[in-house]
Amino acid sequence: MKKEQIWGVSVCLLLSCASAPLDAVPVEGEEYTNITDAEVVPVRPVHSFCAMRADDGPCKAMIKRFFFNIHTQQCEEFIYGGCEGNQNRFETLEECKQKCTRDYPVNITKTKVTLHKEQPDFCFLEEDVGICRGYITRYFYNKQSKQCERFIYGGCLGNLNNFESLEECKNTCEDTLNDRIQVDAPSKKPSSFEFNRPYWCLTPADRGLCRANVTRFYYDSVIGKCHTFEYSGCGGNENNFTSRKACFRACERGYIRRISKEGLIKTKRKRKKQLVKIEYKFVTLQHHFY
């Protein structure tokens, strides 16, 4: 395909996105009867940038690259323009799979850590500000200092080591008991997270391309709540609702914060044709008492 043709396709896609009407998003009271189980795509945000769309950038080169398609759950080829773009861009198919594909084999080394018996393993994840540009005060557990510390969260994605208050972080992650156990824990990727709701519930809030300021609601997949944002009036993505109730119906219902002793949470709610399922899986820890 010639360079001019690819550029023309990009322009057409941009115009199509810009012309999206305000009523293209779900409205309050909508029951989503057109959603089938096949469309509820399981997503594992190993890295937050894996949820971003392929971005060829503003330049006009034709460079073969790969990106992770959140809709198909596969790494796919695309043509990169040569400048700017985003982090969801890889030189090889193998690199893309290693970063973003679920259950891709990765060499994991074990390290000795001391932790509370009930301490969830996501407490050992690094702080992750996410891909958005907000300025929200949050708290995370620092596995080096063994204390909860303050950090600035961007507002979307990230990981589960993210708490709204210092007290919540301490109650969840800080080891306050005298009786401790020695366990083997993986030094990388300690947890698995499957998100079996509609894929757009995982995408970040997208203001869009126009200049209006319309109050809308989006689902924050890190904390499991619907929040307001200012929508420009066109473009954006499907994580965009006219009311908090509509956002709750699509994405928030069935969210569970507590973690069982077995480290496994399952919840299923069936509403008409939509199956809503969340499943947290944590690694099996081998206890060595001393």
Image (cartoon, rainbow, N blue to C red):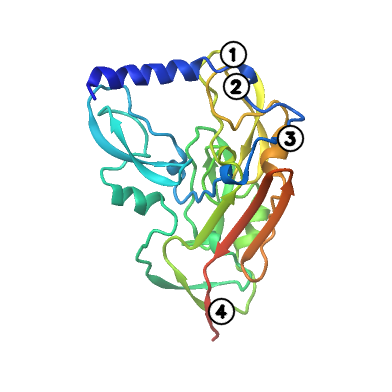
Identify the residue under disc 3.
31
Distance Cα–Cα, label 1 vs label 3:
28 Å
**Vertical arrangement, residue 152 with respect to residue 163, above or below:** above
Mark whose residue sits in front, 3 or 2: 3
Identify the residue under disc 1.
212
First of labels 4, 1 by sequence position: 4
**Vertical arrangement, residue 287 with respect to residue 203, above or below:** below
Seen at 28% across and 31% down, the residue is 80
The 10 Å Cα crowd at callout 2, few under 14, some 14 to 19, many 20 or more, is many
Distance Cα–Cα, label 3 vs label 2:
23 Å
Q: Amino acid at mark 2?
A: Tyr
Identify the residue under disc 2.
231
First of labels 1, 3 by sequence position: 3
Q: Amino acid at mark 3?
A: Glu
Mark whose residue sits in front, 4 or 1: 1
Distance Cα–Cα, label 4 vs label 1:
56 Å
Identify the residue under disc 4.
181
Give the image location of residue 160, x and y in percent.
57, 53
Seen at 70% across and 25% down, the residue is 242
Q: Amino acid at mark 1?
A: Ala
The secondary structure type at the circle numbered 1 is: loop
**Residue 8 appears anywhere in the view:** yes
Give the image location of residue 54, x and y in percent.
38, 34
